[in-house]
Image (cartoon, rainbow, N blue to C red):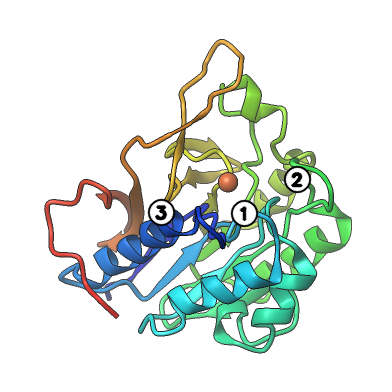
Amino acid sequence: MTASLAHLSDPHITTGPLAGAPAEGLYRALGRLLTLDRRPDCVVITGDLVDRGARDEYRALREVIERFPLPLHLVAGNHDDREELLAEFAGTGFLGEGDRTHYVVDHPSFAVVVLDSTVPGSPGGRLGPEQLEWLDEALTRRPHTPVFVCLHHPPIAIGVPFLDGMCLDDGEDLAAVLTRHTDVVRVLAGHVHRPVTAGFAGTVLATASSTHLQSGLALQGGVPHYLPEPASALLHLLSGQVWVTHTVPVSHAAATIGCF
Ligand SMILES: [Fe+2]
């Protein structure tokens, strides 16, 4: 059996005079995925879907993604507005056909569990006991199923002080839930606008770069700024019995970019 999930993050779609670059970045990343010689089963975008959480930005996002031919799952980030996101996408496949920003989608070879770590008015994140209990139940109902748990805020500090000041508050509580289950193959996050990998709660945490701008690697503190470093997608794929993660260059792709 073959299976794969493509992981993008932080497109920061906006409107007005600055709208072109982020929309082009997301469109190009999705187009690159279409030219892979085996298309992924689905795509997850781990938050900061838009820049200001405004309704017209979600309409612009819809214009970019609505003709994309593969299942595409949206995750809320701190730049998103939960109500506006739901107003545009509730009931569509982009939110698992449901009316919540935390949901599960079952694919033939794996399940995608999407969490909402946003805290209105804060750049940081928190899941809270109710959502963690819901996660525990969702995992319990899917024994022996590979699961991707997706959220915006990384649950650990990544060694960049500016970003570590706004990671997930209850990462240890998330770890406590995940360690009760053995089939979580990846925790997927965004927020840090850099590709980062770490062991976490008996599984592997992977953050994807932004499809727009990357954060500078400010290891000693200070503001990392946002730079046009190369953008990439992550492709998590089943190789034999093992899930492996490939980095797929997008902004510097030596490959055909598809249209849709
Ligand atoms: Fe972001």
N-term-proximal mark, 3 vs 2: 3
The residue indicated by pointer 3 is 21
Residue 125's mark? 2
Q: How many marks?
A: 3
Which quadrant is home to the N terminus?
Answer: bottom left
Nearer the observer, 108 or 143: 108
Secondary structure type for disc 2: loop
Secondary structure type for disc 3: helix
N-term-proximal mark, 3 vs 1: 3
Residue 51's mark? 1
Give percent across and percent down for residue 201. 61, 42
Nearer the observer, 119 or 168: 119
Estimate how packed mark 2 is, as few (under 14), some (14 to 19) or many (20 or more) residues with alpha carbons within 10 Å.
Answer: many
Residue at image point 34% right, 35% down: 229
Estimate how packed mark 3 is, as few (under 14), some (14 to 19) or many (20 or more) residues with alpha carbons within 10 Å.
Answer: some
C-alpha span from label 1 to label 2: 17 Å
Asked whether the residues under the numbered discs 3 and 1 touch, taking CB atoms below 8 Å apart as contact, a structural biologist would say no
Nearer the observer, 110 or 217: 217
Residue 125: which quarter of the image? Answer: top right
| 1 or 2: mark nearer the eye | 1
* Residue type of the residue flagged with mark 1: Asp
Is residue 154 found left or right of 235 in the rendered image? right
Residue at image point 62% right, 54% down: 51
